[in-house]
Image (tube, rainbow, N blue to C red):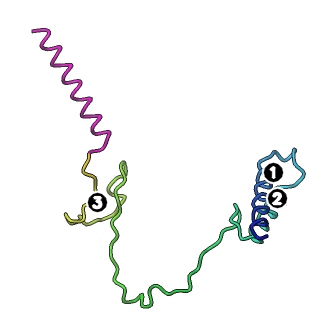
Amino acid sequence: GEAIALIWARSAIKEKMRLLNTPEYMRSARDNNLKQQVTQLGLNFSLVTQWTAFVAVSEKNYNPNPAYTPSRDIPLPMVKGVNKQAYGNQRRAAPGNFTGAVVPEPAMLFGLFLVMMILGWFLMRRSQRN
């Protein structure tokens, strides 16, 4: 029975959300009324909706003595196109902690290929003139 109730609640929420996307002159219920119904269904059946959310809380204490826990810097991966100043004053990673890729970026490979094609074309034209 509980699974059927959940399926019904999901279906009812889906229908009410569809009604919310329908123009107001084509439906019988108001926006606030539909939002309240969706919220109530979500709360009654423990379902996440656009206006409800649930937070998981653990009873277990994972850090019993936080005052003596050492703080460490967490390295951030650099995002292409973002200025290095956006990351603040970072220390260089040790050689053993290298996190980059061995292969060059595809845009760099394409650029090198394009330069080589232009250079080849230029050399062919030059040899044809001589």
**Whole-percent x, y for residue 60 in the image:** 52, 86
Is the Cβ of the residue at disc 2 closer than 8 Å to that at disc 3?
A: no
Q: Tell me how far mark 1 sits from mark 2, CA to CA.
A: 8 Å
Marks 3 and 1, how far apart at CA:
49 Å
Residue 59 higher or lower than 24, as above or below: below
Identified by mark 2, the residue type is Leu
Q: Which residue is mark 2?
A: 34
Callout 2: 10 Å neighbours few (<14), some, many (20+)?
Answer: some
Mark 3 residue type = Thr
Residue at mark 2 to residue at mark 3: CA–CA distance: 50 Å
- The secondary structure type at the circle numbered 1 is helix
Quadrant in which residue 123 is drawn: top left
> What residue is pinned by disc 1?
19
Residue that appears at 36% across and 48% down: 81
Depth check, front residue: 90 or 21: 21
Answer with mark 3 or mark 1, whichever residue precedes in sequence: 1
Residue density around tag 3, few if under 14, some if 14–19, many if 20 or more, within 10 Å: few
- Identify the mark nearer the N-term, 2 or 3: 2
Q: Badges 1 and 2: C-beta atoms under 8 Å apart? A: yes
User: Along the polypeptide, which appears first: circle 1 or circle 2?
Assistant: 1
Q: Position of residue 100 (x, y in %)?
A: 28, 56
Q: Nearer the viewer, residue 15 or 80?
A: 15
In the rendered structure, find residue 125 and report the number of the disc placed on it. Answer: none
Identity, as a three-letter code, of the amino acid under mark 1: Leu
Q: Is residue 69 left or right of residue 104?
A: right
Q: Is residue 120 magenta?
A: yes
Which residue is denoted by mark 3 in the rendering? 99
Residues in magenta, as a range: 104-130
| Label 2 element class | helix
Assess whether residue 127 is covered by the magenta stretch: yes
